Image (spheres, rainbow, N blue to C red):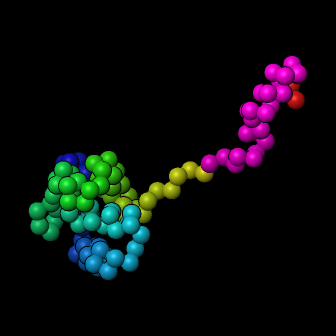
Amino acid sequence: MDKYRIILTVEERARLEHMTSSGKAAARRLTHARVLLLADELHGEACSDAEILSALGTSVRTIERLRRRFVPEGFEAALDHRPQPPRPDRNSPASECNSPMRSFIFLWTGEDP
């Protein structure tokens, strides 16, 4: 991927190497650190996405997403995962409007409960 080239500073690379060698981080964070180390173009020869895929066993989509996040958002954003948006509460009034019991009552009585 020529558009999203990963170039790490010496400090970033040292931090990633320390993180992966100690193994004291979340699995997703360690995988992201390993991908960044393998994709770094400044220090040695960068691996292609296919080589990273075979070395780490992660998906191509994960590698692409990580490259795309690293370039505009930076080092920390690439290591941290983006949380999912909050889901609506199952017991909220909005969910009761479409509940199966409400449909059953309507079918049975012909009246909206």
Residue 67 seen in the figure: no
Q: Is residue 99 magenta?
A: yes
**Residue 79 position by quadrant:** bottom left
Q: Nearer the viewer, residue 29 or 46?
A: 29
User: In the image, what residue occupies the spot 20% across and 48% down?
Assistant: 1
Name the residue at 15% across, 58% down: 47
Say above or below: 20 vs 83: below
Q: Position of residue 61 (x, y in %)?
A: 32, 47
How many numbered marks does the figure carry?
Answer: 0
Nearer to the camera, 45 or 22: 22
Does the magenta portion include 102?
yes
Magenta span: 87-110
Q: Position of residue 45 (x, y in %)?
A: 11, 62
Residue 109, above or below 5: above
Residue, far left:
45
In the picture, which quadrant includes the C terminus? Answer: top right
